[in-house]
Image (cartoon, rainbow, N blue to C red):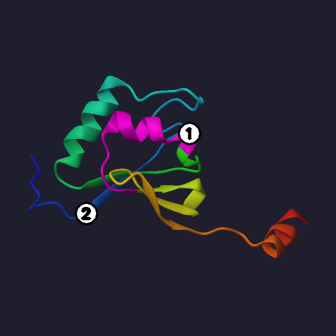
Amino acid sequence: MYTHKTLKYKALLVDVDGTLMVATPDGVPTKKVLHAMDRASKFLHVGLATSRCILNTAYILDMLKLSGPSILEGGACIYDAAKRKSLSEQVLTRSEERRVGK
């Protein structure tokens, strides 16, 4: 059994769709996944890494009882589940949007 003193890693960031759960808008993690995430969170930071926005991720954060930062919106947002607020957001400017859209 691992303890906090023997772990090499400080964080576990898990993809949502197709990894943590079935890729559907209303999908939920299985009981087995919930248990594994709960156990892992006792030894290291556990968060999500997903392209989903907070509106489509909040219920998952709540189910998993995550309390630290997660990466949302494909990396454009760092969200703190405990504080229920964005810690960092990278938004495209109008000119960047036009360049990407070409």
Would residue 33 be counted in the magenta stretch? no
Question: Rounded to the nearest whole Å, what is the CA distance between mark 1 and mark 2?
Answer: 26 Å
Determine which residue is flagged by label 1: 56
Task: Report the disc number at residue 10.
Answer: 2
Secondary structure, mark 2, is loop
Q: Main secondary structure of the magenta part?
A: helix
Q: Residue at x 58, y 48 (%)?
A: 53
Question: Is residue 5 shown left or right of residue 79?
Answer: left
Q: Position of residue 84 (x, y in %)?
A: 41, 51
Q: Is residue 96 above or below residue 57?
A: below
- Hey, which quadrant is residue 60 in on the image? top left
- Disc 1 crowd, CA 10 A, few/some/many (<14, 14-19, 20+): few
- Disc 2 crowd, CA 10 A, few/some/many (<14, 14-19, 20+): few
Q: Position of residue 46 (x, y in %)?
A: 31, 51
**Labels 1 & 2 near each other (Cβ < 8 A):** no
Q: Is residue 97 above or below residue 27?
A: below
